[in-house]
Amino acid sequence: MLTLSTQLDTYLFLGAMLFGFGVFGLVKRPSLIGMLISAELILCGASVNFMAFNHFLAPDKTVGQIMTLFIMAIAAAEAAIAMSIIIAVYRNYRSVETQDLSDLQG
Amino acid sequence: MNIPISADMASIVKEGVFFGFLIVTVVGALLATCAKRMVRAVFGLVVCFIGVAGIYYFLGSPFISLMQLMIYVGAVAITIAFAIMLAEPDEDKIEAKTPPLAGPFAVVLGVAVTWALAAASLGAKWMNPAPVEKEGTITQVGEALLTNYSMVFELVSIVLLIAILGSLVVARSGRDKSC
């Protein structure tokens, strides 16, 4: 019988896929908000990997959970700062597209 | 009335629920990266996070699953939704201005990164699972947070404090009465 949920490989592939989706969105999205969303996906993929190794391989099963909690805290801080930067950029340029933020291009 | 449920059937149901969470996660990620409207992308992000919370439940930690729902779905997604409301991105204009090769290049890069990571992690020979010392219950997580990881715990709280203050300062500068 198919037992996906008890295999480490399933979770590792899911983590890799979330990371790949994040990279994909980071390149594809032309706006800062889309890039922020993709960055959250990348962090989520990393968390899934930590939790998978924690469940299947680690002798001390608190380590991965605590690492995931720290990743969540960092993601929350990152989202707050990115939001304030987006608002500041919008106030100065009236746009949140990466194409328009080209003052230093010469 | 008591219907006997065989172990086989229970495991089929379990696998089905797990597969459902996998599908929800992937569909959410797809929506988050491909939706044209930013609000729909945020909705896709929420769906993806809910799926990942279910995955965490299958990985044996309901606590992290709950935290995922509270922090990511409750806080991060709402923050991004506020960013959309405050900055009002002009989606139609963005669509027109996207470089023509960005889409295909992004697809190639995303597939390449996924393939490389998956090949590296699935092809690797992991060590045999060590004998379990701690089960990872909520009590043990709490004890570890306040003993072994207390320094990191304090540092993360300072990082969060500075992030809040910094985002206030950055978002406030240049604000005038007229707008």
Image: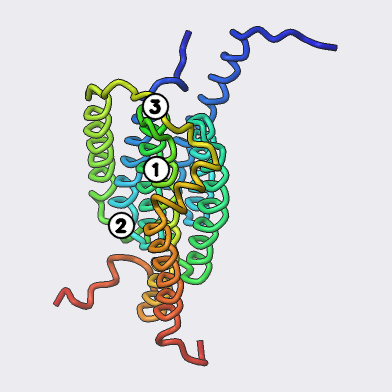
Disc 2 to disc 1: CB gap under 8 Å: no
Label 3 residue SS: helix
Q: Chain of mark 1?
A: A
Q: How is the image coloured?
A: rainbow
Percent x, y for residue A74? 40, 58
Disc 3 crowd, CA 10 A, few/some/many (<14, 14-19, 20+): some
| CA gap, disc 3 and disc 1 | 14 Å
- Residue A56 marker: 3
Residue under label 1 = A47
Residue A18 visible in rendering? yes
Q: Amino acid at mark 3?
A: Phe
At 41% from the left and 85% from the top, the residue drawn is B173
At 62% from the left and 14% from the top, the residue drawn is B10
Mark 3 / mark 1, whichever is N-terminal: 1
Q: Amino acid at mark 1?
A: Ser
Disc 1 crowd, CA 10 A, few/some/many (<14, 14-19, 20+): many
Tell me where residue A60 sits by quadrant: top left
Q: Chain of mark 2?
A: B
Percent x, y for residue B130? 34, 25
Q: Nearer the viewer, mark 2 or mark 1?
A: 1
- Residue B98 marker: 2
Q: Amino acid at mark 2?
A: Thr
- Going by the picture, which residue comes out furthest to the left? A106
- The vertical placement of B18 against B101, above or below, is above
Tell me where residue A47 sits by quadrant: top left
Percent x, y for residue A87? 43, 74
Residue A9 visible in rendering? no
Q: Chain of mark 3?
A: A
Q: Nearer the viewer, mark 3 or mark 2?
A: 3
Quarter of the image with the C terminus of chain A is bottom left
